Amino acid sequence: MVLIPTAPVRPPTDEHIHRGMRRGWWLALLLAVLPTLAAGQDANECDEPGEAPDIIVGDLHLVQRFGTENGITGFSVGTISCNPGTCWAKWFGSTNEHPVIAQNMFRLKDGRFEQVGQSWVKHGFFALSQDFCSNSCVADLTGTHLGVNCSDPYTSMLNGDQSRLGPRSEINASTGKFPYPFSTQGATGGPIYKRLQVHNTDLDPALNPGAAYFVEGQYVTADDILGGTEANNNSYRPVDVTDNGGAFDISLTGSTVQQAAAVKAWAAEDPGVHGASVQVINDGLFLVYSNATDLGGGMWHYEYAVQNLTSQRAAGWFEVPLPSGALVQNIGFHDVDYHSGELYSSTDWIGQVVADPAGDVVSWSTTSFGIDPDANALRWGTLYNFRFDADAPPVTGDLTLGLFVPNPPASVAVQARIPSSCNNDGMCEGAETCSDCADCVFVSPPTGFCEDGLCEPGIGEDCLSCPEDCNGEQSGNPSERFCCGDGDGEAPVGCGDTRCTSSGFTCGTSVVEACCGDSSCDPVELCVCAADCGTVPPGELVCNDGIDDDCDGETDCLDFDCCDDIACADGIDADGDGVADCDCDDSNDQAWAPPGEARSLQLSHDGLVGADLGWLPPAEKGSVTVTYDLLRSSDQDFVGSALCLTLADPAVPGAADGDTPLPGDAFYYLARALNECPDPGPLGNDSDGNLREGLVCP
């Protein structure tokens, strides 16, 4: 494309409402300019490979309120389109080779970004050549094209002109094609007919405290799509809503955010929002934005906003995977109403938990295409919301967006915030994996030492404490001296410095990262990964290997299990209590072993209030004196839901409980003996022979 070096011709700046009146003037000016342009040398024509127009919304610049009917207010939004592409865009008003313009409104309230209004599409009819987006507009004076770097304004009155508003259902947003003349062309009606309609209840400041609102414009045009530049055709801008005695109005505020769909305003307001896009092959583009909010008590709220920018196939179902056994509550859905005789249904999608052999999902769906092609699918230019609460924390993973119109692919996967099986308890269990849960990734403490060839700041190594590993250059020209490790020494530098990763030096850390579930039992996994290391043994297996085999926090000879092992026994009775090697505290002659089990717990109840309990002392006290804990539970869980009862005299093997269970309920009790040894006595065995676990009382 060659630009003829002629003086630029500036078009008039009249509003579009005067365009028909000026047409003769434009044609006269065109005749004066055309002789200077040679065939194949026009700066605007799409006559070179790779050239394409690129229509964007440069500004949302005016708003208009038209009135209210049946609790709904009608608005319109003015748009300024720009063409920063490499050739002109077609703008033939009397054919189907022109853009159509959609207007939308959104509300951000209580962490939910929802579409609250939409208009029919305005059909473009004449392109001015102004310079809103650039000072180098290559004008087309016929009004049938928007030239390179030119802008074209439509006022809010023009974008609300009912005679030029057509149904969205006639527009194929993935190709830009539509029939012309369009249906209802020239038809007019009441103040809200075909216009951007919003329910007053969605606008009323008294009903929407703290809400933020946004308007959006979107251009759809075939030659822009053919050139592959249609993904940036949306722009949005904040608006304020005011109540003028029950008449709700909007006013522009802030600046237009160019080339961005409105859902991106949610992420701009909340950095915790995750955004992703998915392009359907041979179709159009969806945006999927999501967030997870901690509700407390182990519950999380999941919120999804899915905006269909240009997909003609639309979306007909939406699924979020669940971890096994997840509790799901408050499943919700929100869409935006069609209106003014648009043929699509507005029936809400049905949301439910669906059991699936591959894993349960929360699923929403509309009526299938085979039953009703005009069902309430998530169609181009609209945003739908999906939400629920679950007792599972979030992770970034794949959810599924199902396509409404049958064709391969039937669905697409997209990244979002989804419930995870990860409970962050430090144990890798259930469906948790290394890829989605930190519980399954274990990092060992640093194992390095001086002279191991690794300069390791994490264990305090630097040029002074370990010059063998960390010295770089500490002599010669002072400007060339350096020391690895950020510690003491001359000119210390971090491990990221290239001098510390070359010339024979290695700088970093000796920690080892292990993954639970990879069938390799690394030392750091011993106590937390049964999948790789098996069940934790009941006691120390080897008493001189430096490993805490039974994961009780005591290793080798420090573990009472090893008291009589040959590696630990020394035969010395330091406190003179008659017990040498297996004394629990060889500095205390009043205690030598943990007490045994408190025996024969009995309960008596007079049928009125409370109960009396008694038990026998342990057969082996392990000390001169013992005391007791008494635990009570209403469900036999003596860890999570147990209470430690207050005893009048902890040294007496008996107590009174003044409480009585409600009718149909029961109380369960366990007694435990204690002495001055660090470990308490056992709580006995359950019906399977396993040692009972119980709450540790203060």
Image: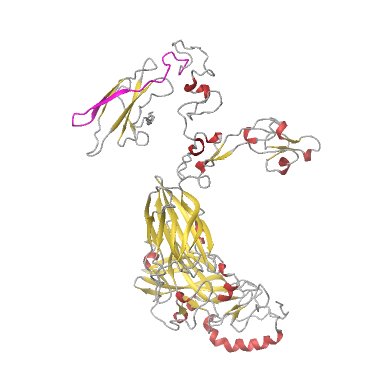
Q: Is residue 292 above or below residue 179?
A: above
Left or right of residue 386: residue 32: right
| Quadrant of residue 447 within the rendered picture | top right
* Residue 273 visible in image: no
Residue drawn at x 58%, y 39% is 513
What is the residue that sits farthest to the right in this orientation?
476
* Residue 440 visible in image: yes
Q: Is residue 124 above or below residue 693?
A: below
Point out the stretch of residues depicted in magenta: 584-613
Q: Position of residue 406 (x, y in %)?
A: 46, 68
What is the residue that sits farthest to the left in this orientation?
607
Q: Main secondary structure of the magenta part?
A: loop
Q: Is residue 655 above or below residue 91?
A: above
Q: Quadrant of the N terminus?
A: bottom right
Q: Position of residue 655 (x, y in %)?
A: 27, 25
Residue drawn at x 56%, y 39% is 514
Residue drawn at x 18%, y 29% is 606
376 or 461, which is in the foreground? 376
Q: Is residue 40 above or below residue 682?
A: below
Number of numbered discs? 0
Q: Position of residue 604 (x, y in %)?
A: 22, 27
| Quadrant of residue 620 within the rendered picture | top left
